[in-house]
Amino acid sequence: MTTSALPDILTDILKKEPIPKDTIAYLVARTKLRLHNFILRRLAVVEDGQKLDQARIARRLGVSRAQVSQSLGVPGNWTVASVTKLAAAMGGEIEFQWKPFQALPEEQAQSFQAPGADEFEELKPDEKDAA
């Protein structure tokens, strides 16, 4: 794991001043990654329990399997509509929870370690389909 600038980001957010554009960009990217990982993890659970694969999702949405695979591959262009459609095709919906930012205690801020890439396990849909 590597040391991160998260304490600086929290400081940017908790100040009552405009939030820097790079901080906003970081938060947007982090939220997209979290949502993408959530959908992929949920798809793995649904697939195991209901044998729901990309082909079946595609049929339910009236699109090609390639379009579903491409959509699941990267979250870059996901919209509320596209995520809602994926969730519905998987048999559910997504709920949200509000979590306010809080300052880290000084000792945590000084020794904060950002999660490494290994902690954001990626599920590659094409590899699952081959299994």
Image (spheres, rainbow, N blue to C red):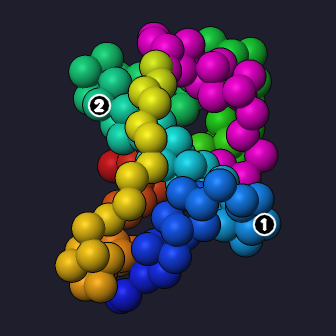
Observer-nearest residue: 92 or 108?
108
In the picture, residue 91 is in which quadrant? top left
Q: Can you identify the residue that label 2 sits on?
A: 45
Residue 114 seen from this side: yes
In primary-sequence order, the first of circles 2 and 1 is: 1
**Residue located at (78% from left, 66% from top):** 21
**Residue located at (37% from left, 32% from top):** 42
**Residue located at (49% from left, 64% from top):** 10
Amino acid at circle 1? Lys
Residue 17, image x, y percentages: 72, 59
The answer for how far apart the CA atoms under marks 2 and 1 are is 36 Å
Mark 2, Cα crowd under 10 Å, few <14 / some 14-19 / many 20+, is few
Residue 22, image x, y percentages: 73, 71
Q: Can you identify the residue that label 1 sits on?
A: 21
Which residue is the extreme one toward the front? 16
Q: Is residue 53 left or right of residue 48?
A: right
Q: Is residue 122 above or below residue 97?
A: below
Observer-nearest residue: 47 or 39?
39
Q: Is residue 51 above or below residue 105?
A: above
Residue 111, image x, y percentages: 25, 84
Q: What stretch of residues is rendered in magenta? A: 74-94
Which residue is the extreme one toward the left? 107
In the picture, residue 122 is in which quadrant? bottom left
Locate the N terminus by quadrant: bottom left
**Residue located at (66% from left, 67% from top):** 23
In the picture, residue 106 is in which quadrant? bottom left
Label 2: which secondary element: helix
Label 1: which secondary element: helix
Q: Nearer the viewer, mark 2 or mark 1?
A: 1
Reply yes or no: does residue 98 show up in magenta. Answer: no
